[in-house]
Amino acid sequence: MGIFDRLKASLTKTRQAFTERVETILHRRRIDEELFDELEETLLAADIGFETTQFLLNRMQKEARRKKLETADQLVPVLQEAILEILGEDPEPLTFAIPGPTVVLFVGVNGVGKTTTIGKLAKKWSDEGKKVVLAAGDTFRAAAIEQLVIWGERASVDVIRQTTGSDPAAVIFDAINAAKARKADILLCDTAGRLQNKANLMEELEKVYRIIARELPGAPHEVLLVLDATTGQNAITQAKLFSDVAKVTGIVLTKLDGTAKGGVVIGIKQALRIPVKWIGLGESIDDLQPFSAAGYAQALFSGATWIVGDNA
Amino acid sequence: MFDALSERLQGAFQKLRSKGRLTEDDVKDAMREIRRALLEADVHHAVAKEFTERVREKAVGQEILQSLSASQHVVKIVHDELVSLMGGEQERIARAAKPPTVVMLVGLQGAGKTTAAAKLARHLVLKEHRRPLLVAADIYRPAAIDQLRILAKQIDVSIYAPGNHISPPEIVREAMEEARKAGNDYVIIDTAGRLHIDETLMQELSVMKDIAQPHEILLVIDAMTGQDAITVAEHFHSQLSVTGIVLTKLDGDTRGGAALTVRHVTGCPVKFVGTGEKTDALEPFYPDRMASRILGMGDVLSLIEKAQETIDEKQAKELEAKLLKNEFTLDDFLAQLQQVRKLGPLDQLLGMLPGMGKLKQLPAGAVDGSQMSKVEAIILSMSKAERVKPELVTKSSSRRIRIAKGSGTQVKDVNQLLRQFEEMRKMMKQFSSLAKGGKKGLGSLAGAMGSMGKKGGMPFSHGGKRRK
């Protein structure tokens, strides 16, 4: 199953899928104010946010007038195009540094799935024949190190660790040197979850970032903000404040296999130019996939017109 | 992004200042802003719509209270309505007539169930003198059992954790037996995070519920949850009949509109909120504070409470005495600064004050904690005598140069600090005459806070701006 199908399947898991609603709204209806009200609700329900929703609605209204569109389904490509325009071209999911190691730093608030994401990527790249090393930089949460170690065993890769309570910057320091010495291709650095308004914890992260940059010029090559698709508008502040201390290069949007759509990433791309690079569509290792804007937009909107044909 | 609703409403109401009664049209404008505020706080759109409708009905035709402007009046209606929707009274955790009381925590992955379970156990031990048993029934997430085990040890609570080789329903069955044998009066079951649409795992929860017969099923929900909170709450509630809500990660800067959504869907009260990563960070839920927060109106009550917890009462009294005698020195100032700092990051603190929303528009760093570190360094580079008599420094340029060098700052920074300290002393002098009127304890802090408000920033923040 391709990413697109998988995404479609994920997004249509429930009868109340967002996609169905777009379908229901758009099918052979005349374009009127009531229609835009319903579209607004649908966009809002996907966590696209007030500002971006207004932006998209305005765009549709303008286009509808300009192109003299009559029925609602003609709006689908307009909406899709507007979203694709914001999301832009798909980025490379990972830029490999030559020579290695390529250092990837994972950041985010608590409970978004940083450790799990690292575990899955470690397995993926290790299976592809890359030498992967993990750094257990979450030295705060109880059993966080053990959790990463279990993932390390599953992926058969080394985990550089100290004990709970030790300085995360020191762990990362060790890990970079270990990765260099062991000639690793990829070093994945876990960090403790932290809320972006905690000044001291953000300073700690800044230090980790600084140490990586100091120990390996050009690193970190990627800083991935792990974002839970269930999160609402607070994700924008997360993206902004994490970028302030550790220049975020991309987003991993996790838990897209639920009913949440993670539409806030559209606003984040628009406001902060941070692209989504990976999406998490389930528990198994293959469910972490490179992001495709077209797939995402299509699955969200027009895809629905064909997927849920029985509803028409 | 975080403009207070009241500021927005002021815009919508500018034209109706002179009127004594709200008309349908005035209210319509206001409702648009209220809806927007709710949506930006992540209240579900349908809930927001229904809510604004209720408020509209209440607001139309009302006499504007004499003491309040139209915008404040509408905000008050909105606020009151939010409070009443989120439940008037504080609700306690259930207690079974025949122990043990069984509490089951359920929710999505990463909501914070394991941490909440430990916090709840600690709360029961310390605040209610109970003997809870924690049950590790999350056999799926790697190291989840270890996590609960470590937390249980930290808070010195017994735990039943047979490992991940037996099924969660079986763990629950055994744990109930264990609790009866050991005489525990509470059983707190930590379950694995799961998607609300995962039928197999949701079914598993039902089975566990049948076995444990819990008196309380708490839905643990992340305060940052967006519109999907409605679907999550609906599914968990219809499957399990949730009895209460734990709202986690409320120490973030999220407005937490999900609280209203979940309350609306389940009709269950929020029983606790999580406000930090440590096991002591569990607080009761205050609907009025939550209402203010959703509306972006600041949270004065929380600030006062935080201050009460952090400020050293004795030190505050001493300081007050000094103020009254006008003996405030740079040492005292430093102590004061350090106390304010203990309250948390400055911008977060200011965010709790109403009308401080505007400060968010200040250039980054204007209310920066680093400014405080600088002041701290300068004072620490002074001799004891200099701290007591800043005039010594004011008069001597060689002292100023020495202090600047010692603190890694510039002479102008030292000058600025001295000037501002002098201003502050004058202010304190005025304040001390007020304080003689009978203010107690927190007076000095409240005074300092008050002056922050009046000047639109910390005493030292305009220095930062000037340098820009």
Image: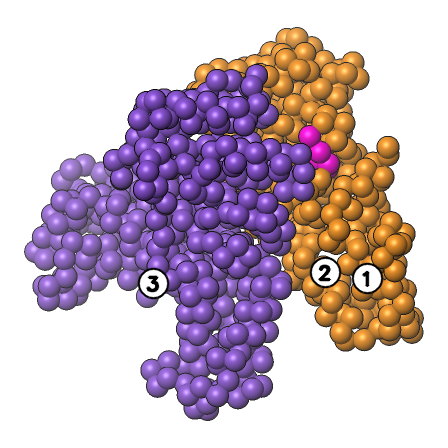
Chain colours: A orange, B purple
Q: Which amino acid does label 3 sit on?
A: Gly
Q: Position of residue B60 (x, y in %)?
A: 50, 84
Point out which mark residue A42 bears: 2
Q: Tell me the element at label 3.
A: helix
Marked residue chain, label 3:
B
Q: Where is residue A243 in the image (x, y as percent from the top left)?
A: 59, 41
The residue at which mark 3 appears reads as B453
Query: How far separated are the C-alphas under marks 3 and 1?
Result: 52 Å
Quadrant where the image shows the N terminus of chain A: top right
Q: Quadrant of residue B449?
A: bottom left
Marked residue chain, label 1:
A
The residue at which mark 1 appears reads as A24
Q: Is residue B209 left or right of residue A59?
A: left
Q: Which amino acid does label 1 sit on?
A: Thr
The residue located at (40%, 49%) in the rendering is B271
Q: Is residue A4 above or below residue B467?
A: above
